[in-house]
Amino acid sequence: MSNIRWRLYGLLLIVVTLTFIDRFNMNVAAKHIQQEFALSDIEIGSLLSAFVLGYAVFQVPGGWIGDRLGPRLVLTGAILWWSLFTAFTALGYSVASFWIIRFLIGVGESPALPCTNKMIGRWMAVSERARGSSLFLVAVGTGGAFTPPLIAWCMTTWGWRVSFLACGALGLAVAALWHWQSTEHPNQHPGVNAEELTHIQAFRTPVANPGPFPWRRLFASTSIPALIVANFLLGYVTYIFYTWFFLYLVNIRKLPVMAGSYWSTVPFLAILIGAPIGGYLSDRMVRQLGQPWGRRVPVVIAAFASCALFFTGSRLENPYHAIGLLAFAAGCNSIAAVSSWTLPNDLSDRYAATLAGVLNTSTNLGGALSPLLTPYIANRYSWVAALDVAAAFMIFVGLLWMLVHPERRID
């Protein structure tokens, strides 16, 4: 049997990793931009939130366009869009200009994960869905692990503006690679043989062209409302690592900038390890327990473990011990998030990209709140209190998943 589906997985991994590189580069640059333009923590938080706001608001339109025009085509255009505005970041000269550019990068990236999720649904066998969905978190780990030291080195050597120009050029290369090496459907790829095509298409029902999105049916059960709230909370917690963790290590734990850039990668290494483990466990638990418990059990265990790790790690005086426990919390979050990304394809073949957009909108609205509320709580109370909020949210994520029913499809 040919294995072109895993080659496409590799291409998607490159694409999604690029989205996180272009998301994380501002986190490292924030220290330099803050000093050069004399910005407050709240102003820096607003710049970090600008990306997330544009990204969240356009998730559903981006997924809808992917369902209508095809995820491969839309993904190509999206890469070109956000790469162009990433390069434009080098031209920023004020809070307003940076805010607009970061917002437009978020708009450009908004179709990326919904379209990627639909490609996974098309290309991966039903029994491989969670492993395929672990792609998103593997990309988080890869982008988060390598971006801070590379960007910090580039900024130290050539300045922060050059780093954004380099990221923009990288995006053009990735867009070309993706467009020339991928196809919309497995049966269109010359390398996919009959055995692999049969494997991919097993246990599927024929998919008609998407009609109007069934909003009423979507909210008739507890699954989607529970997932929307759970994803909002999970997004809030996850974006602490995306946005403030580097500055937390430098400003609060008093690590040097280069040391902070290296140690800030540890949670993403944990995500890199945790995501495929979570995908494997989720698929295996579904085979053993069936739905809904096969998807639920890994999420509930991981969410409760994350809560305990946040609560304990924030209180450790040794910064390196604290980093270790907080990194494990990030890894547990990735195990929970894998099942969340699997749900759109569990619930629907026809509307998978739109549904992924709905859920990722919620995730990123939580993410948009996180860069603003986290420093507010930390400044008013303490960083321990800010991380306690994250711990409490993870408890609610686990409880809400008890209301999720992946077996109740909306097609």
Image (cartoon, rainbow, N blue to C red):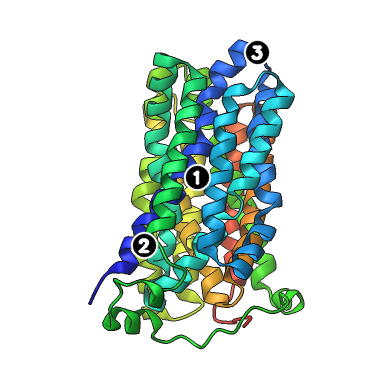
Q: Position of residue 308 (x, y in %)?
A: 48, 46
Mark 2 or 1, nearer chain start: 2
Amino acid under label 1?
Thr
Mark 3 or 2, nearer chain start: 2
Q: Which residue is rendered at x = 54% and y = 16% of the image? A: 32
Q: Secondary structure at mark 2?
A: helix
Which residue is tagged 1? 19
In the rendered image, the residue lying farthest to the left is 1
Discs 2/1, front: 2
Label number found at residue 8: 2
Label number found at residue 252: none
Q: Is residue 218 left or right of residue 311?
A: right
Can you say which quadrant of the picture contains the C terminus? bottom right
Q: Position of residue 169 (x, y in %)?
A: 45, 35
Q: Position of residue 349 (x, y in %)?
A: 55, 77
Amino acid under label 2?
Leu
Q: Position of residue 381 (x, y in %)?
A: 67, 26
Q: Secondary structure at mark 3?
A: helix
Q: Is residue 280 left or right of residue 205?
A: left
Above/below status of 271 relative to 7: above
Which residue is tagged 3? 37
Can you say which quadrant of the picture contains the N terminus? bottom left
Above/below status of 71 relative to 100: below
Amino acid under label 3?
Phe
Q: Alpha-carbon distance for marks 3 and 1?
A: 26 Å
